[in-house]
Image (cartoon, helix red, strand yellow):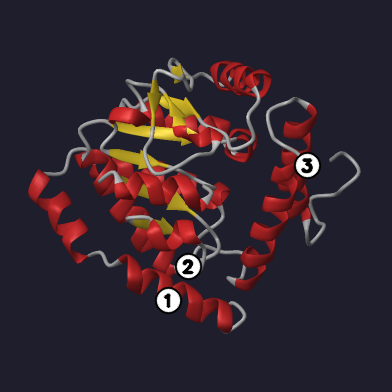
Protein backbone atom coordinates (compact mmCIF):
# COMPACT_ATOMS: atom_id res chain seq x y z
CA UNK A 1 0.00 0.00 0.00
CA UNK A 2 2.97 2.33 -0.50
CA UNK A 3 1.04 4.33 -3.09
CA UNK A 4 -1.87 5.13 -0.75
CA UNK A 5 -1.25 7.90 1.79
CA UNK A 6 -2.57 7.48 5.32
CA UNK A 7 -4.55 10.65 4.80
CA UNK A 8 -6.68 8.87 2.19
CA UNK A 9 -10.29 8.67 3.50
CA UNK A 10 -10.46 4.95 2.63
CA UNK A 11 -6.97 4.10 3.88
CA UNK A 12 -8.01 1.51 6.49
CA UNK A 13 -10.43 -0.16 4.12
CA UNK A 14 -7.79 -0.33 1.40
CA UNK A 15 -5.24 -1.80 3.80
CA UNK A 16 -7.68 -4.54 4.78
CA UNK A 17 -8.40 -5.31 1.14
CA UNK A 18 -4.67 -5.57 0.57
CA UNK A 19 -4.33 -8.07 3.44
CA UNK A 20 -7.00 -10.27 1.87
CA UNK A 21 -5.35 -10.07 -1.57
CA UNK A 22 -1.99 -10.90 0.01
CA UNK A 23 -3.64 -13.87 1.70
CA UNK A 24 -4.83 -15.17 -1.65
CA UNK A 25 -1.40 -14.68 -3.17
CA UNK A 26 0.21 -16.54 -0.24
CA UNK A 27 -2.19 -19.46 -0.57
CA UNK A 28 -3.87 -18.73 2.76
CA UNK A 29 -7.16 -17.24 1.63
CA UNK A 30 -9.51 -18.66 -0.97
CA UNK A 31 -10.39 -16.41 -3.94
CA UNK A 32 -13.97 -16.82 -2.75
CA UNK A 33 -12.88 -14.96 0.38
CA UNK A 34 -12.52 -11.79 -1.68
CA UNK A 35 -16.27 -11.85 -2.34
CA UNK A 36 -17.06 -12.50 1.31
CA UNK A 37 -14.81 -9.63 2.40
CA UNK A 38 -16.49 -7.24 -0.01
CA UNK A 39 -19.90 -8.20 1.31
CA UNK A 40 -18.74 -7.59 4.87
CA UNK A 41 -17.25 -4.24 3.87
CA UNK A 42 -20.66 -3.16 2.58
CA UNK A 43 -22.27 -3.95 5.94
CA UNK A 44 -19.46 -2.12 7.70
CA UNK A 45 -20.42 1.02 5.78
CA UNK A 46 -23.95 0.59 7.10
CA UNK A 47 -22.88 0.45 10.75
CA UNK A 48 -20.80 3.57 10.23
CA UNK A 49 -17.46 1.73 10.24
CA UNK A 50 -17.17 1.91 14.00
CA UNK A 51 -17.83 -0.34 16.96
CA UNK A 52 -21.34 0.19 18.25
CA UNK A 53 -22.64 -0.32 21.81
CA UNK A 54 -24.43 -3.52 20.79
CA UNK A 55 -21.10 -4.93 19.59
CA UNK A 56 -19.38 -3.99 22.83
CA UNK A 57 -22.09 -5.81 24.81
CA UNK A 58 -21.53 -8.90 22.71
CA UNK A 59 -17.76 -8.67 23.10
CA UNK A 60 -18.06 -8.59 26.89
CA UNK A 61 -20.43 -11.56 26.91
CA UNK A 62 -18.14 -13.43 24.52
CA UNK A 63 -15.19 -12.91 26.86
CA UNK A 64 -17.23 -14.21 29.79
CA UNK A 65 -18.34 -17.28 27.83
CA UNK A 66 -14.81 -18.08 26.67
CA UNK A 67 -13.45 -17.72 30.20
CA UNK A 68 -16.15 -20.00 31.61
CA UNK A 69 -15.57 -22.66 28.96
CA UNK A 70 -13.90 -25.91 29.92
CA UNK A 71 -12.43 -26.46 26.46
CA UNK A 72 -12.67 -23.38 24.20
CA UNK A 73 -11.30 -23.62 20.65
CA UNK A 74 -10.62 -20.83 18.16
CA UNK A 75 -11.58 -21.86 14.64
CA UNK A 76 -9.64 -20.12 11.86
CA UNK A 77 -10.58 -19.72 8.21
CA UNK A 78 -8.61 -18.09 5.41
CA UNK A 79 -9.96 -14.57 5.78
CA UNK A 80 -9.44 -14.52 9.55
CA UNK A 81 -5.89 -15.84 9.14
CA UNK A 82 -5.10 -13.08 6.65
CA UNK A 83 -6.72 -10.25 8.61
CA UNK A 84 -5.92 -10.91 12.28
CA UNK A 85 -3.26 -13.61 12.75
CA UNK A 86 -1.53 -11.81 15.63
CA UNK A 87 -4.78 -11.21 17.46
CA UNK A 88 -5.91 -14.82 17.07
CA UNK A 89 -2.62 -16.01 18.51
CA UNK A 90 -2.87 -13.52 21.39
CA UNK A 91 -6.43 -14.59 22.21
CA UNK A 92 -5.46 -18.25 22.12
CA UNK A 93 -2.62 -17.63 24.55
CA UNK A 94 -4.81 -15.54 26.87
CA UNK A 95 -7.36 -18.36 27.06
CA UNK A 96 -4.90 -21.25 26.82
CA UNK A 97 -7.05 -22.36 23.90
CA UNK A 98 -5.83 -24.01 20.68
CA UNK A 99 -6.30 -22.58 17.23
CA UNK A 100 -7.79 -24.98 14.68
CA UNK A 101 -7.72 -24.61 10.92
CA UNK A 102 -11.13 -25.14 9.33
CA UNK A 103 -12.05 -24.11 5.79
CA UNK A 104 -15.04 -24.57 3.49
CA UNK A 105 -13.24 -25.09 0.17
CA UNK A 106 -11.14 -28.23 0.60
CA UNK A 107 -7.41 -27.76 0.07
CA UNK A 108 -4.69 -29.56 2.01
CA UNK A 109 -2.11 -27.13 0.61
CA UNK A 110 -4.07 -24.14 1.90
CA UNK A 111 -4.60 -25.77 5.29
CA UNK A 112 -0.86 -26.34 5.62
CA UNK A 113 -0.13 -22.77 4.51
CA UNK A 114 -2.56 -21.41 7.11
CA UNK A 115 -0.99 -23.50 9.85
CA UNK A 116 2.49 -22.28 8.98
CA UNK A 117 1.24 -18.70 8.76
CA UNK A 118 -0.18 -18.90 12.28
CA UNK A 119 2.98 -20.53 13.61
CA UNK A 120 5.02 -17.76 11.99
CA UNK A 121 2.89 -15.28 13.93
CA UNK A 122 3.69 -16.94 17.24
CA UNK A 123 1.11 -19.68 17.68
CA UNK A 124 2.33 -22.55 19.84
CA UNK A 125 -0.42 -24.96 18.82
CA UNK A 126 -2.41 -25.13 15.59
CA UNK A 127 -4.70 -28.12 15.19
CA UNK A 128 -5.55 -29.48 11.75
CA UNK A 129 -8.73 -31.14 10.48
CA UNK A 130 -8.70 -34.91 10.30
CA UNK A 131 -11.02 -37.66 9.11
CA UNK A 132 -10.79 -39.26 12.55
CA UNK A 133 -13.39 -36.82 13.88
CA UNK A 134 -16.42 -35.43 12.06
CA UNK A 135 -19.26 -33.15 13.05
CA UNK A 136 -22.88 -34.20 12.72
CA UNK A 137 -25.54 -32.37 10.70
CA UNK A 138 -23.14 -31.13 8.00
CA UNK A 139 -21.79 -32.55 4.73
CA UNK A 140 -19.25 -29.92 3.62
CA UNK A 141 -15.50 -29.99 4.16
CA UNK A 142 -16.05 -28.14 7.43
CA UNK A 143 -17.27 -31.35 9.04
CA UNK A 144 -13.70 -32.62 9.35
CA UNK A 145 -12.24 -31.50 12.68
CA UNK A 146 -9.54 -32.41 15.15
CA UNK A 147 -10.62 -34.91 17.84
CA UNK A 148 -8.99 -32.85 20.61
CA UNK A 149 -10.11 -29.52 19.16
CA UNK A 150 -13.49 -28.51 17.80
CA UNK A 151 -14.84 -32.05 18.16
CA UNK A 152 -14.69 -31.92 21.96
CA UNK A 153 -15.00 -28.15 22.46
CA UNK A 154 -17.82 -26.79 24.56
CA UNK A 155 -17.36 -23.25 23.16
CA UNK A 156 -16.13 -22.55 19.63
CA UNK A 157 -15.08 -19.10 18.42
CA UNK A 158 -15.86 -18.97 14.70
CA UNK A 159 -15.16 -15.52 13.23
CA UNK A 160 -16.30 -14.95 9.63
CA UNK A 161 -18.15 -18.27 9.67
CA UNK A 162 -20.52 -19.73 7.11
CA UNK A 163 -23.88 -20.73 8.47
CA UNK A 164 -23.91 -24.49 7.93
CA UNK A 165 -21.25 -25.37 10.51
CA UNK A 166 -22.51 -22.84 13.02
CA UNK A 167 -25.96 -24.42 12.84
CA UNK A 168 -24.43 -27.92 13.09
CA UNK A 169 -22.43 -27.01 16.18
CA UNK A 170 -25.49 -25.56 17.86
CA UNK A 171 -27.49 -28.72 17.08
CA UNK A 172 -24.68 -30.67 18.74
CA UNK A 173 -25.16 -28.61 21.89
CA UNK A 174 -22.07 -26.44 21.56
CA UNK A 175 -21.97 -22.73 22.26
CA UNK A 176 -20.77 -20.67 19.32
CA UNK A 177 -19.34 -17.15 19.32
CA UNK A 178 -19.04 -15.42 15.97
CA UNK A 179 -18.05 -12.09 14.46
CA UNK A 180 -20.39 -11.23 11.60
CA UNK A 181 -21.24 -7.81 10.18
CA UNK A 182 -24.54 -9.12 8.79
CA UNK A 183 -27.05 -9.51 11.65
CA UNK A 184 -29.45 -11.31 9.29
CA UNK A 185 -27.10 -14.13 8.31
CA UNK A 186 -27.71 -17.74 9.33
CA UNK A 187 -24.53 -17.64 11.38
CA UNK A 188 -25.54 -14.49 13.24
CA UNK A 189 -28.96 -15.88 14.06
CA UNK A 190 -27.77 -19.36 15.04
CA UNK A 191 -24.79 -18.33 17.19
CA UNK A 192 -24.96 -18.08 20.96
CA UNK A 193 -23.22 -14.70 20.82
CA UNK A 194 -22.86 -12.57 17.68
CA UNK A 195 -20.44 -9.67 17.59
CA UNK A 196 -21.75 -7.43 14.78
CA UNK A 197 -18.54 -5.59 14.04
CA UNK A 198 -15.49 -5.62 11.81
CA UNK A 199 -13.18 -8.41 12.91
CA UNK A 200 -10.15 -6.12 13.01
CA UNK A 201 -11.94 -3.86 15.51
CA UNK A 202 -13.56 -6.64 17.52
CA UNK A 203 -10.48 -8.75 18.18
CA UNK A 204 -8.48 -6.19 20.22
CA UNK A 205 -11.59 -5.47 22.28
CA UNK A 206 -12.18 -9.17 22.92
CA UNK A 207 -8.57 -9.66 24.01
CA UNK A 208 -8.91 -6.64 26.30
CA UNK A 209 -12.11 -7.98 27.88
CA UNK A 210 -10.61 -11.43 28.40
CA UNK A 211 -7.76 -9.73 30.24
CA UNK A 212 -10.11 -7.61 32.32
CA UNK A 213 -12.40 -10.48 33.28
CA UNK A 214 -9.68 -13.09 33.63
CA UNK A 215 -9.62 -12.82 37.40
CA UNK A 216 -13.36 -12.40 37.84
CA UNK A 217 -15.34 -14.67 40.11
CA UNK A 218 -17.48 -17.31 38.35
CA UNK A 219 -20.59 -15.62 39.70
CA UNK A 220 -19.67 -12.40 37.90
CA UNK A 221 -19.18 -14.23 34.61
CA UNK A 222 -22.52 -15.98 35.05
CA UNK A 223 -24.18 -12.65 35.75
CA UNK A 224 -22.78 -11.11 32.56
CA UNK A 225 -24.06 -14.03 30.50
CA UNK A 226 -27.43 -14.10 32.24
CA UNK A 227 -28.04 -10.47 31.27
CA UNK A 228 -27.01 -10.99 27.64
CA UNK A 229 -29.68 -11.45 24.96
CA UNK A 230 -28.37 -12.15 21.46
CA UNK A 231 -31.74 -11.45 19.86
CA UNK A 232 -31.74 -7.93 21.27
CA UNK A 233 -28.18 -7.38 20.02
CA UNK A 234 -29.14 -8.50 16.51
CA UNK A 235 -32.26 -6.32 16.58
CA UNK A 236 -30.19 -3.29 17.61
CA UNK A 237 -27.70 -3.99 14.84
CA UNK A 238 -30.50 -4.30 12.28
CA UNK A 239 -31.98 -0.97 13.41
CA UNK A 240 -28.57 0.66 13.07
CA UNK A 241 -28.18 -0.68 9.54
CA UNK A 242 -31.67 0.45 8.53
CA UNK A 243 -30.77 3.88 9.80
CA UNK A 244 -27.65 3.99 7.65
CA UNK A 245 -25.28 3.86 10.61
CA UNK A 246 -26.94 6.69 12.51
On screen, residue 19 above or below 99 = below
Quadrant including the N terminus: top right
- Sequence-wise first label, 3 or 2: 3
The secondary structure type at the circle numbered 2 is loop
On screen, residue 2 above or below 97 = below
Residue 18 figure quarter: top right
- Sequence-wise first label, 1 or 3: 3
Q: Residue at x 48, y 60 (%)?
A: 186
Q: Residue at x 49, y 67 (%)?
A: 183
State if disc 3 and disc 1 touch (CB < 8 Å). no
List x then y, in percent, for residue 234.
Answer: 42, 70
On screen, residue 132 above or below 24 = above
Q: Which of the two marks, 1 or 2, is nearer to us in this view?
A: 1
Residue that mark 1 sits on: 236
Residue that mark 3 sits on: 18
Q: Residue at x 40, y 68 (%)?
A: 54
- Sequence-wise first label, 1 or 2: 2
Looking at the image, residue 70 sits to the left or right of residue 100; the answer is: left
Residue 69 figure quarter: top left
Residue 52's tag is 2
Amino acid sequence: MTDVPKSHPRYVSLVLRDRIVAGVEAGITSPHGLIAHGRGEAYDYLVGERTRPFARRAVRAAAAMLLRAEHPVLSVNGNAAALVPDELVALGKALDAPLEVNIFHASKARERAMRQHLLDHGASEVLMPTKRAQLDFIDSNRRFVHPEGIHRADVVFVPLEDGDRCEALRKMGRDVITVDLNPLSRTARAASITIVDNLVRAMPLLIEQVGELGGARPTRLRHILARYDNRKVLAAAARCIRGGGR
